Image (cartoon, grey):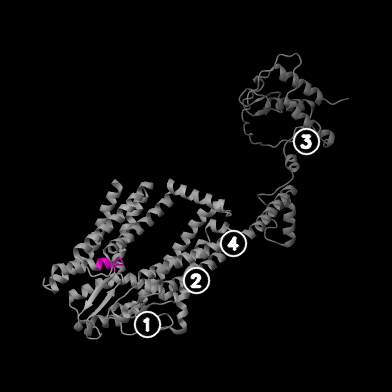
Amino acid sequence: MVTATIAAIEAAAAALAGVLLVAIPALLVWVVAFQLAAEPASVFAAVTGIWLLAHWVPLGFALTPEAALALGQLPEELRFTLSLAPLGITLVTLLLAARAGWRFGGRGGVGAAGVLGGAAGFGAVALLLALFSAPETPWPLGAVAAVPALSYGAASALAFVLRAARDEHPWWRASVRETLHALEALGVRGAAAMPSRAGQMLRLAAALLAIAVGASALALTVAIVVGYPRVIALGQGLQLDPLGSLVLFLGQLALLPDALVWALAWLTGAGFSLGAGTSVTPFETLLGPVPSLPLFGAIPSGWGALGALAPGLLVLGGLAVGLLFARRPEIRRAPWGVTVVSALLAGALAGLAVAGLAALARGSIGPGRLAEAGADPWTAGGLAAAELGTGLLLGLVAGKADAARLRGTLPAMAAAAGALRRRRAEDRDAGAVPASETREAARDAGTPEAGREDDQETAPLGDALSRLRVPGWAGGGTGGEAPSADPDPAPDPDPEPAPDPAPDPEPTPDPGPQAGAEHETEPESEPRAAGGNDSPETGALDAEALLRAYSWDAAGPVTIDREGESLGAAGDGGEDGPVDAKRSRLAARWRRRQEPRG
């Protein structure tokens, strides 16, 4: 109840704001032009009548014989109805209603009371204005109050539903769930995917309508610029003072949305009329006497065969929307049938919206043949649906086909990438080409790099090992010929400490001799080079150095004094280094293996 009351007060304020927009120019005219000579009741009735006209309540006029003669009619009393709504004033009401409905939609289901309360409050203001001003209207008092209330309530309810759908309120989810259950009970296939597809279709329709309105705004701007000399001529022909020019400008500003809808109908090819027997289309323009409103000076002439360019503009607009939406994943993944149906339904919805706009911007602008003005709703809506829907379908199909072609090439691209990876793996397994062969090929070809050493040359590991100084017991060639100045080897990282061995009488072999055992087989497979001068003592010293290098208590790199009898690690003082009984026994066993067998 509180929400409804607040909404009613807000709607009443919105209605009074619209009345104020009409009252300010009317009061200026009453004070400046009429010098307060007119009756205040007449001024108030005129203000109320214009505001009601903006909400589709027709007004009745009665002309004296003199006034009828001045308008080009027979000199007799004339009565007619003015029903063309100035949509500029209507737009203010609709925007305020949509704002209120959007806010109430954020409150969930309780916001529905705000929508109803707003419609009631707006209708109450319309009823009070009609009672106190008594405007000339052919409608009964109930209809005078109901139509403005419905206009406000419809805009508010639409915004309320859109907000609820976006926020997925519980009542909205429950409604969707019940609808899906009903569709599944009827045997409709794919009912679970309908909410998302319906949302996508509505977005497509909204985009089509937006681009159609944008194209009509562009066309109207071009028409005003091209017909500006005629517009100025009509304005000067009225010979108005500054206040009259201001009022005329405000009146045409209120009619500008009507002109925008007429421009949209003109783009569809349906055109519009300014009286019985008249037609304004891209192909031809047939007009009789029209009111001297400067805005009518922007009516374009017919283009003949080139008039087909105007509907083509809407087709291009639909094509652009289709190409833009075709990038969305949900459209790329959708089946072709769903895409086609969505495009057709979106075009139909956009056409219905155009038909509704044309109906709102249609009415009477004067007596006699001026009783018909505006576009035919069904013709304009049908052509708009066909043109926008065709463009949208072409855009979606083109974008989806391009995406499908790309998806078709992906397996081939993946296969090619896999083949390339396998080939690289095979090349790595086959090994690198020796650099000597590369240099020989370059030397034969006479390239500048023929004699240059390659910093990244690859060679067999055996060649590199043969260049090192290998002890005589390991199968090296000339073990006694050591380099004159060997750089100190980098210290090995400290190995992880091993547990203390158990006190067994016969110690188990250490991994060091096993590593040396691998070298022991080399003299058997490769004969010792002739002229080797390694003595047994030298081999024993080398074995002791190897054992010391693999021990866990070596403090640094092992140094061997060939000329003396010392053996030790760097920093431990040669023979004074810590060599336990276990390594002594292993060294003695190793020496016996290295002694020549007689």
Which label's residue is closer to the chain start, 3 or 1?
A: 1
Count of marks overlaid on the render:
4
Marks 2 and 4, Cα distance to the nearest angstrom?
20 Å
The residue carrying mark 3 is: 476
The magenta segment: 50-57
Residue receiving disc 2: 386
CB atoms at circles 2 and 4 under 8 Å apart? no
**Which label's residue is closer to the chain start, 2 or 4?**
4
Q: Find the distance from the CA under tag 3 to the CA under tag 4.
A: 78 Å
Q: CA distance from mark 1 to mark 2?
A: 25 Å
Residue 310, above or below 214:
below
The local crowd at label 4, few if under 14, some if 14 to 19, many if 20 or more residues have their Cα within 10 Å, is some
Give the label, 3 or 4, closer to the camera: 4
Query: Image height check: is 539 above or below 290?
Result: above
Quick check: is 591 in the magenta stretch? no
The residue that mark 4 highlights is 336
Task: Determine the secondary structure under disc 4.
Answer: helix
Q: Nearer the viewer, residue 568 or 430?
A: 430
Question: Which residue in the protein does label 1 denote?
Answer: 278
Picture disc at residue 218: none
Task: Report, in whole angstroms, how far the alpha carbon at label 3 lies from the one at label 2.
Answer: 94 Å
* Residue beneath the point at 35% across and 84% down: 287
Picture quadrant of residue 528: top right
Give SS at disc 3. Answer: loop
